Amino acid sequence: MPELQLLRLDHAPALLVFEQENRAYFAAAVPDRGDDYFARFDERLRALLTEQEAGICYFHVLVDPAGAVLGRVNLVDVADGTADLGYRIAERAAGQGLATSAVREVCRRAVDSYGLTALRAAARIDNTASRAVLARTGFTVTGETRLSGRPGLTYLRRLRP
C-alpha cells in the first residue's frame, strides 16, 4: 500500500522520475511546469524544502513500497489557519482511489499536525476526476474561476467548527 510522506531531499530522484514520466499526462489537466522546472529541479526542490521548514507550505509525496512516487499532495500558502490544496497522481496509478485517500490523509494532517482550520482548492470544470476527489473528501463549491484560461470552480473544506 502506498504511504503518504512529508517531502524530503532524498525523495528527489523518484520525484524527478515521477514528474518526467507524467509530464504530458499532467499537462492535459493543469499548466505544464515548463523546461526550466526540470533543468533547475534540484534548486527548486531545495527552495520548496526551505518553505516547508518555515511552515509556509507542506509538500507530501505518495510513495509505493519500492520507493517510486505515485503522487503529490501539497498544502501551499499556509496563513491564518488556511492553505491551498493541490494534488496530482501518476497516470499509471489513476483510477485506484489513491487521490481520494491521500487527500483525506492530508486533511487529517492539516488539523492534527499543522493546526489548520480550512483548505481551499480549485479545479477546471473539465477535470471531472479532480472534481470528484474534492466532492468525495468533503470540499464544497464556493464559486467560479478561470484556470489556465479555462472555466473552473473554487472549493472550500472547513476542517474544524
Image (cartoon, helix red, strand yellow):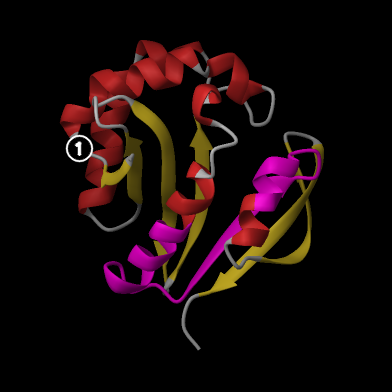
Compared across the picture, whether 144 is left or right of 10 comes to right
Left-right relation of 22 to 116? right
Is residue 126 magenta-colored? yes
Q: Residue at x 42, y 38 (%)?
A: 72
For residue 15, side relative to residue 85 (left or right): left
Instruction: Give the image quarter of residue 60.
Output: top left
Task: Say whether residue 117 is visible.
Answer: yes
153 in relation to 15, above or below: below
Lateral position of residue 103 relative to residue 141, left or right = left
Toward the bottom, the furthest residue is: 161
Q: Residue at x 59, y 25 (%)?
A: 26
Looking at the picture, tell me which residue is in the foreground, 31 or 111.
Answer: 111
The kind of secondary structure element at disc 1 is loop
Image quadrant containing the N terminus: top left
User: In the rendered image, is residue 42 in sight?
Assistant: no
- Residue 96 % position (x, y): 54, 38
Question: Compared to 35, does 100 lie above or below?
Answer: below
Identified at 69% across, 23% down, the residue is 28
Q: Is 156 covered by the magenta stretch?
A: no
**Range of magenta residues:** 104-132
Residue drawn at the location 39% of the way across and 72% of the way down: 116
Quadrant in which residue 157 is drawn? bottom right
What kind of residue is marked 1? Answer: Arg
Q: Which residue is mark 1?
A: 8
Quarter location, residue 69: top left
Q: Is residue 54 above or below residue 33?
A: below
